[in-house]
Image: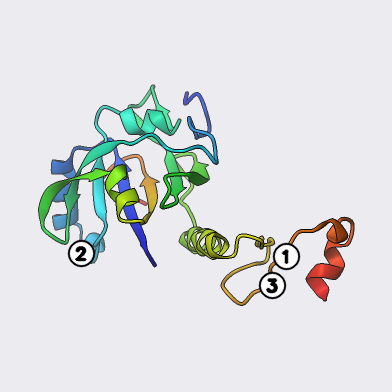
Amino acid sequence: MGCDIVTVSTDTEFVHKAWQENEKELAQVRYRMGADPSGKLARLFGIYDEDTGLALRGTFMINPDGILLNAETNYYNLGRNIDELLRKFKANLYMSRKTSEVCPSKWKEEGDKTLAPSAEMVGRVHEALEG
Amino acid sequence: MPETAGTGLKLGQKVPDFQIKTYEPTRRDFGTFRLSDQLARKRWTILFFYPADFTFV
């Protein structure tokens, strides 16, 4: 899909290697595992916890022009929903090709109803979605 | 406590170039990820931060 996933934690690249090679749950991992032991990258994205020296569960989507389009952060104890992340990525990808359309809250994938905002639609979004 | 709920950057902002060391399972070797490489190859990037290896997702 023209997208590269990079996981990042404050562990070093050596710990990533040890973890990926030992944990059977990670045997199929193909993405790059980033090391941010100084916390510099986590601080750049505003998710570094100074008390623990760890990064929070943040996900950030950057388009091919380097623009940050999405940010989602959870606290330590809440895992992210991968389906929702995929949905958001697919929506971003779709809208990068169809720049006059927006994806409403029920949009899941290409082919689902989108909106083309205009002055006529003001106050008539219901009709636009149902029509 | 973390100062922000993320991001230190604003949405719609151009992310400054950065690089980080990586472990790459496909090559079983270490490498370097650079945002500028992604932009040169016209690729999307998803950064997925998590607290620590050897813990439970």
- The residue that label 1 is drawn on is A115
Whether labels 2 and 1 belong to a single chain: the reply is yes
Do the residues at discs 2 and 3 belong to one chain? yes
List the residue tagged with mark 3: A113
Residue where numbered disc 2 is placed: A27
Q: Position of residue A86 (x, y in %)?
A: 48, 63
Q: Is residue A25 left or right of residue A122?
A: left
N-terminal of the pair, mark 2 or mark 3, is 2
Mark 3 belongs to which amino acid?
Lys
Q: Nearer the viewer, residue A5 or A116?
A: A116
Disc marking residue A85: none
Nearer the observer: mark 2 or 3; the answer is 3
> Hey, what amino acid is under mark 1?
Leu
User: Mark 3 packing: few (<14 Cα in 10 Å), some, or many (20+)?
Assistant: some
Q: Which residue is drawn at 82% across and 76% down?
A: A131
Label 2 vs label 1, nearer the camera: 1
